[in-house]
Amino acid sequence: METKKAVSIIKIGGNIIDNPAELAQFLLDFSKIEGYKVLVHGGGKSATKMAESIGLTPQMIEGRRITDALMLDVAVMIYAGQINKNIVAQLQANQCNTMGFSGADGNLIQSSKRNHPTVDYGFVGDVKKVNTELVSSLLSNGVIPVFCAITHDGKGQLLNTNADTIASELAIALSKTFEVTLSYCFEKPGVLYDSDDDSSVIEIMNQELYSKLRHDKAIHSGMIPKLDNCFNSLLKGVKKIKIGHHRMLKNENTIYTTIEL
C-alpha cells in the first residue's frame, strides 16, 4: 500500500493579520515549512474596521458574521483583495511560490447559502464541495495555495465563509489522498481554561471536556465554530489538529492545544 504524502494546512487569524511585524514573522516561518502546504487566512478585524469606517455595524452570532450585501462587498475587498494579495506578495519575497484564491477561482470551493431555521445570516456560505483534484495538482506542481474566506455558489454569487471552516473542509477533502495535519494559529498559546490567563493552556482537548467548558461558558464566541470544525475534521479522516501561537510550527517544545476525539 502506497504511503500517503503529508500536507500541512495552516489557518491564521486573530491579531496576527492585524500586526504587520507578527504577520511578517509568521510568513517567514511558514515559508520554511517543508513539504506540501496550504495557507488559509481570515481577516475579520480588518473587515470590521473597514465596515465601521463607512457606517456599517458588523453583527456576530456565536463567532459567525452576519453578511448583508454591503458587508459582503467589504469582505470581498478585504479578504480576497487587500489581505490575500499582501500575503501572497510577502511569501513570494520569501521565495515561497504562492497563488491567492477565493473559492470561485478554478471552482476550488463551492458553497450553498446558509439556510438557518431562526437566523438570517445573509450571504454566508456553507462549504459543499472542494475541488481536491485541482488543489492536488497545484501542490504537485510546486504551487502553494493561499485561500481567503470567500467562496461561491456556482451560480454567480460570492459568499462569506468562516475561514476556520474552509481550513477544516480543505483538510477533510485532502485527507482522502494525503496525511493531513491541520494547524490553527492565532495570537494565543492555545485553547485556554481562562481567556484572560495565557498560562491556562488546555494541552489536550477532547469532546467531553469541550462540552463541559461550553456549558460553563468558559468557551464562547469564535472558539466555538473553531472547535466544532476540529472535531468534525478528526471524525472525517484528518490525522492531527493543533491550536496555538504560530511558534508551534517551528518549535516542538512550545505548549499548544492538541485536539482529540
Image (spheres, helix red, strand yellow):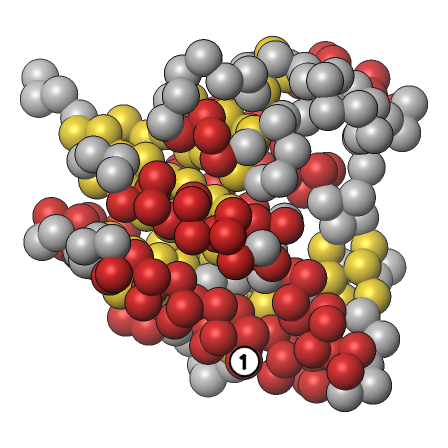
Q: Amino acid at mark 1?
A: Met
Vertical position of residue 259 compared to residue 113: above or below:
above
Q: Residue at x 73, y 62 (%)?
A: 65
Q: Is residue 159 left or right of residue 200?
A: left
Q: Residue furthest right?
A: 216
Q: Is residue 67 left or right of residue 165?
A: right
- Percent from the top left, x then y, of residue 42? 55, 57
Vertical position of residue 118 compared to residue 260: above or below:
below
**Residue 109 seen anywhere in this rendered image of the structure:** no
* Residue closest to the eye, 84 or 215: 84
Identify the secondary structure beneath mark 1.
helix
- Percent from the top left, x then y, of residue 112? 55, 65
| Quadrant position of residue 36 | top left
* Residue closest to the eye, 198 or 180: 198
| Quadrant position of residue 5 | top left
Q: Residue at x 50, y 18 (%)?
A: 254
- Percent from the top left, x then y, of residue 161? 57, 61
Q: What residue sits right under mark 1 in the picture? A: 77
**Residue 146 seen anywhere in this rendered image of the structure:** yes
Q: Residue at x 46, y 26 (%)?
A: 248
